[in-house]
Amino acid sequence: PRHPRLRQLSPRQLTGIIKSANDVRSLLKIYAQHHDEFNHIHLGAFWNRLGRHAGKERAWLRSSHEELQLLRDGTLQQLRQLEARELANVAHGIAKVGIGNSAMWSEVWVAISGNAEERLHEF
């Protein structure tokens, strides 16, 4: 489900909101409302935060394909723009969330590995 946009945020404000979110559903709501404002730093911070808070909601996340579709598509679209640090944050976040082994995420893993191989000199 699409969430109405509250207002356009500055990059600094969006980073602050992502870093202050304290649960998975809040993070997903932020993504739904502001995903088109996300840059490579926001995406890396988002996945880092999602991985940190996924523990208690891992089962819900694994069964929430519809809620995660927008995130999956947006992540896939932005992967080419990520630098090494953000790419590592995304991969680590997906792994910590525990959703990376579903078929829905296989294309993302292929893109991450290809991008990482191209950026080996940055790691």
Image (cartoon, rainbow, N blue to C red):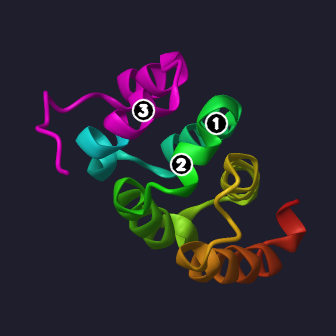
Percent from the top left, x then y, of residue 93? 69, 48
What's the residue type where badge 3 is placed? Answer: Arg
Percent from the top left, x then y, of residue 6? 13, 28
Regarding mark 3 in the picture, which secondary structure is present there? helix
Q: Which residue is mark 1?
A: 54
Residues tagged 3 and 2 counted as in contact (Cβ below 8 A) = no
Mark 1 or mark 3: name the one nearer the start of the chain.
Answer: 3
Percent from the top left, x then y, of residue 19? 54, 22
Percent from the top left, x then y, of residue 85? 74, 50
What's the residue type where badge 2 is placed? Answer: Leu
Residues tagged 1 and 2 counted as in contact (Cβ below 8 A) = yes
Regarding mark 1 in the picture, which secondary structure is present there? loop
Q: Nearer the viewer, residue 53 or 65?
A: 65
Q: Which residue is mark 2?
A: 61
What's the residue type where badge 1 is placed? Answer: Ala
In the picture shown, does residue 115 fall above or below 56? below
Please state if 20 lies on the left or on the right of 69 as rendered: right
Q: Which residue is mark 3?
A: 25
Residue 22 magenta-highlighted: yes
In the picture shown, does residue 39 fall above or below 3? below
Magenta extent = 1-30
